[in-house]
Image: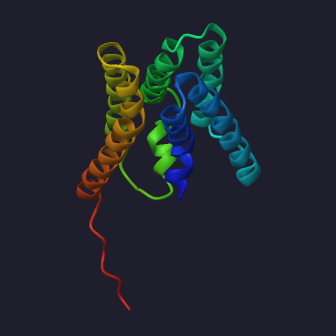
Amino acid sequence: MQLLFDFFPLLAFFVAYKFADIFVATGVIIVAVLLQTAVQWFRHRKISTMSLISAGLVLVFGGLTLWIHDEAFIKWKVTVVYWLFAAGFLVSQFIGERPIIQRMLDANVTLERPMWLKLNLIWALFFLALGALNIYVMFNFSTDTWAKFKVFGVIGLTLVFTVLQGIWLANKLPPNEPKTG
């Protein structure tokens, strides 16, 4: 359910794009992100840093897209978000007690610091690659193809990456010790 909530603005964008155009879809994603942020605030009384960054960039780049009537801004937003996330992951390797991925998964996963750093770096590289891939699709394909990639490509790649990360982690975790009665 959380995954659906996280991808709600993206799915709303795609549906609006299919029924209208990129500018209507941009308005829809702005509203969806504001709604998503409000729901997160009311449910948890806080908003994650990633959500704030993403929402802020949707408002700025989406607003520019609508104001100037140029779809390039909303397309660039995707790369900017992913590269900012990558930068955050990379910086957390050197600043602070724990890298970002450890802060996110620490309650559920126990790893040694070198493994946390490796996993954190893998996430940074993933976000760098997604940003670069967005630029490639943006400049080499139609807006329709870009919109499909933005939704299905990004969601699909993220799900595959997450599953592969889970398999990698499962191989790195110590085996469960049998319980004695």
Q: Percent from the top left, x then y, of residue 149? A: 36, 32
Q: Percent from the top left, x then y, of residue 181? A: 38, 92
In the orientation shown, which residue stands out farthest toward the front? 19
**Number of numbered discs on residues:** 0
Looking at this view, is 77 or 164 the one in front?
Answer: 77
In the orientation shown, which residue stands out farthest toward the bottom? 181
Looking at this view, is 96 or 27 the one in front?
Answer: 27
Looking at this view, is 164 or 63 the one in front?
Answer: 63
Identify which residue is drawn at 45% across, 26% down.
82
In the orientation shown, which residue stands out farthest toward the left? 171
Looking at this view, is 21 or 134 the one in front?
Answer: 21
Q: Percent from the top left, x then y, of residue 84? A: 49, 22
Q: Toward which corner of the image does residue 69 lie, by quadrant?
A: top right
Instruction: Report the coloring of the rendering.
Output: rainbow
Identify which residue is drawn at 37% across, 17% down.
138
Residue 128 vertical placement versus 110 (above, below): above
Identify which residue is drawn at 30% across, 80% down.
178
Q: Percent from the top left, x then y, of residue 154? A: 38, 36
User: On the rendered structure, is 150 left or right of 73?
Assistant: left
Q: Toward which corner of the image does residue 60 lie, by quadrant?
A: top right
Identify which residue is drawn at 71% across, 48% down.
39
Residue 35 vertical placement versus 94 (above, below): below
Q: Toward which corner of the image does residue 9 lie, by quadrant?
A: top right
